[in-house]
Image (cartoon, rainbow, N blue to C red):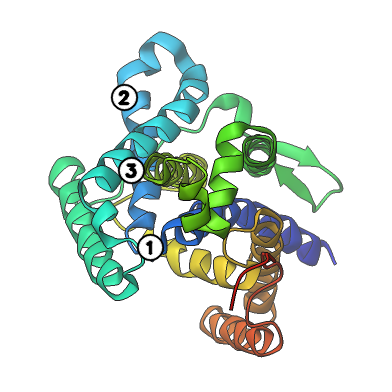
Amino acid sequence: MDTFVMQLFNGLSLSSILLLVGLGLSITFGIMGIINFAHGEFMMFGAYSVYLVQNLTYGLWGDFFFIFAIPASFFIAAGLGFLLERSIIRHLYNRPYESILVTWGLSLIFQQASRNIFGASNVDVRSPDWLKGGISISDTIQFPYNRIFIILIAIIAIAVMYFYIYKTTNGLKMRAVMQNRAMGASMGIQTRKVDSLTFAIGCGLAGLAGCVVSLLGSIGPSTGQNYIVDAFMVVVMGGVGSLAGTIAGALMMGIISPLLEFFTTSSMGKVLVFIVVILFLQLKPKGFVTFKSRALD
């Protein structure tokens, strides 16, 4: 039972990471129709941002460098995403096949660029002293502070995104374009600006996921690829563009996967996860939550 509780807690922290990555994918695909296979590399950018902040400021700020690394990882990834959207992605709207090929090629370019800059070997980010240790529930159960911190970051990010999407003018424009781009444009919404801002926010969330992943182990050029497949499954299961659906999909993927791997093996657990996803999509092909709107046939 103690091992089961620890696996459940670890699943919650994994769900938090998948939630941050999957939310960016969900809103990007929902608005622009872009299947972004380079999304994992923005997670890598966020992780390397923490590494750079650590090396540049650790002697000045000590363990508090990580507090400054959190916004740095978001804004660096968001800025790079904005530049990518304005230069390349904007020409791929509603062209899923072309977007798959182009973004897959971009992911390879970004990975090789990181190898040239940081080296092929993984690098380590020093975990702050205030994130070492954990909360002891019993003699055999301890919840590490770093995983609790990851869950808190995900909760804060979801709260901020909820406020942005449902309580701000830009969020209203985002939802309008997501549901009916032509109608939104006819009402005066500058859809190109909405696309750029949304893509940047989605990439920033991936960068934030990379920031917290650096607390769990070494980071390298393939860091994002370790999570991108699961993130796509979160989006498919949750429903494109849905905040609540993405949360449900991330919880399902993050908790089921470690438990199945615990009761079987690592490879068999992955196989069973794919079987669960396939069966789920047979029952609910549009995911947990779908948008409903009036439209002409």
Can residue 124 be seen here? The reply is: no
Cα–Cα span, label 2 and label 3? 24 Å
Q: Look at discs 1 and 3 and give the one toward the viewer.
A: 1
How many neighbours does mark 1 have within 10 angstroms: few (below 14), some (14-19), or many (20 or more)? many
What residue did someone put label 3 on?
81
State the mark number for residue 237: none
Lower sequence index among marks 1 and 3: 1
How many neighbours does mark 3 have within 10 angstroms: few (below 14), some (14-19), or many (20 or more)? many
- The residue closer to the viewer here, 8 or 85, is 85
For this view, does 188 lie left or right of residue 140? left
Q: Residue furthest top?
A: 60
Q: Helix or strand or loop: what does disc 1 sit on? A: loop
- Rendered residue at 16%/41% (across/down): 117
- The residue closer to the viewer here, 246 or 143, is 246
The residue type indicated by label 1 comes to Ile
* Residue 56 sits in quarter: top left
Q: Helix or strand or loop: what does disc 2 sit on? A: helix
Please state, as top left, top right, bottom left or bottom right, where the N terminus lies in the image.
bottom right
The residue type indicated by label 3 comes to Gly
Please state, as top left, top right, bottom left or bottom right, where the C terminus lies in the image.
bottom right
* Residue 156 sits in quarter: top right
What residue did someone put label 1 on?
34
State the mark number for residue 55: 2
For this view, does 186 lie left or right of residue 107? right
For this view, does 95 lie left or right of residue 178? left
Q: Position of residue 130 (x, y in %)?
A: 62, 25
The residue type indicated by label 2 comes to Asn
**Above-or-below relation of 37 to 23:** below
